[in-house]
């Protein structure tokens, strides 16, 4: 009896395998379409990686691509030969370059990735440490028409939440003017322009130190193992292996150097202050909501009610009372008014 069941199960598996192997069968068509989608996504991963390496002036080789994507070198070589046969690459294994067609395709994928990260951050409120992985999944499904609609919905952002420039519809990538924090001489207050989101373990460390685009850094002490800095006025130690993943520019407005300026979260209940600036780290829906409530530059704001649970805290702005979470109030700069 058991042998009969084994025979029936084996026969069923063979029949299922036969159906899947026949492209004319629905199951076969489904399997073939799934295989093609996975192949297309992998080609796009390779194209985007090559484009990023070129933009960052890193050497492009099959070994470097395999290491960046975490794939076997043999698979990378096989796939890149196929892609070269389709006119997506020029040159040889010692000098890999995207063709015009390959460059257009790579820019589309990069634009899709960064616009989708912006959507997830600005509209969906997804935490920064989850943006990259989710965008990697979505970037392969977005058409040119989808990107045009998404770009318009987001208000045509120039950069993604990490500070990376978003390619224009014409494929133009705006150059950034920052330098790595590892090159900082510490002579002036600087502003973070860009935070690298790969590898994830280093990005998680940056997030834990409060390093986001738009925050201000002041050097307290330089040591061989890293830098002691103030991040928006709060002391932090940044290990040396994190410094190259932070891009900065000198701060010329003097906001972070003004002793009268503080965070909205630090404003005592019952006092009044004038809004100086909303950090660039407040984006999309959250930024529009705050501005719709009147929290714009020059507006007077006053904490009127503390929450026993901490969040949100109640503030009066332009005659209305609104609740603001601490994580947002940390990113709003105000100038406290002197007592009469």
Image (tube, helix red, strand yellow):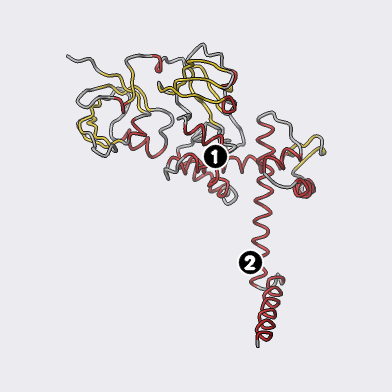
Q: CA distance from mark 2 to mark 1?
A: 30 Å
Give the left or right position of residue 79, taking residue 229 as reference: right
Snapshot quadrant of residue 274? top left
Residue 289 vs 243, above or below: the answer is below
Residue 113 vs 221, above or below: the answer is below
The crowd level at tag 1 (other Cα within 10 Å; few <14, some 14-19, many 20+) is: many
> Between residues 291 and 330, which one lies in front from this camera angle?
330
> Between residues 156 and 300, which one lies in front from this camera angle?
300
Q: Secondary structure at mark 2?
A: helix
Q: Earlier in the sequence, mark 2 or mark 1?
A: 2
| Residue in the picture at 47% in, 33% down | 208
Residue lying at the far top of the rendered structure: 187
Residue 114: image tag: 1
Instruction: Specify the quadrant that holds the N terminus.
Output: bottom right
> Between residues 146 and 62, which one lies in front from this camera angle?
62
Give the left or right position of residue 10, taking residue 90 as reference: left
| Residue in the picture at 55% in, 48% down | 145
The crowd level at tag 2 (other Cα within 10 Å; few <14, some 14-19, many 20+) is: few
Q: Position of residue 218 (x, y in %)?
A: 46, 17
Residue 66: image tag: none
Q: Secondary structure at mark 1?
A: helix
Give the left or right position of residue 91, taking residue 254 as reference: right
Write down the residue under mark 2.
Answer: 30
| Residue in the picture at 61% in, 42% down | 108
Instruction: Specify the quadrant that holds the C terminus.
Output: top left
Q: Position of residue 126 (x, y in %)?
A: 44, 43
Q: Do the numbered discs 2 and 1 sit on residues whose CB atoms are within 8 Å? A: no
Give the left or right position of residue 228, taking residue 267 as reference: right
How many numbered dots are placed on residues in this image?
A: 2
């Amino acid at each position: 009896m058991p042998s009969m069941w084994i025979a029936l199960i084996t026969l069923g598996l063979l029949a299922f395998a036969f159906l899947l192997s026949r492209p004319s069968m629905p199951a076969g068509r489904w399997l073939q379409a799934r295989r093609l989608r996975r192949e297309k996504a992998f080609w796009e991963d390779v194209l985007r990686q090559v484009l990023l390496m070129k933009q960052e002036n890193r050497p492009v080789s099959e070994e470097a691509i395999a290491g960046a994507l975490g794939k076997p070198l043999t698979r990378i070589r096989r796939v890149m030969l196929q892609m070269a046969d389709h006119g997506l690459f020029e040159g040889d294994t010692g000098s890999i370059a995207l063709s015009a067609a390959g460059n257009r395709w790579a820019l589309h994928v990069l634009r899709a990735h960064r616009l989708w990260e912006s959507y997830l951050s600005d509209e969906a409120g997804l935490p920064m440490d989850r943006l990259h992985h989710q965008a990697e999944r979505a970037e392969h499904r977005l058409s040119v028409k989808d990107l045009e609609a998404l770009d318009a919905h987001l208000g045509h952002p120039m950069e993604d939440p990490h500070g990376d420039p978003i390619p224009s519809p014409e494929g133009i990538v705006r150059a950034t003017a920052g330098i790595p924090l590892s090159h900082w001489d510490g002579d002036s207050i600087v502003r973070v322009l860009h935070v690298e989101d790969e590898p994830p373990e280093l990005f998680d460390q940056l997030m834990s130190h409060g390093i986001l685009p738009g925050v201000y850094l002041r050097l307290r002490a330089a040591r061989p193992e890293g830098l002691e800095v103030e991040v928006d006025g709060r002391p932090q130690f940044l290990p040396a292996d994190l410094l190259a993943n932070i891009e900065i520019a000198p701060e010329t407005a003097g906001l972070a150097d003004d002793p009268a300026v503080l965070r909205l979260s630090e404003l005592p209940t019952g006092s009044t202050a004038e809004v100086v600036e909303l950090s660039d780290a407040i984006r999309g829906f959250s930024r529009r909501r705050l501005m719709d409530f009147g929290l714009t530059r020059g507006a007077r704001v006053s904490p009127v009610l503390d929450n026993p649970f901490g969040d949100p805290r109640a503030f009066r702005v332009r005659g209305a009372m609104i609740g603001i979470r601490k994580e947002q109030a940390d990113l709003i700069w105000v100038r406290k008014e002197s007592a009469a």
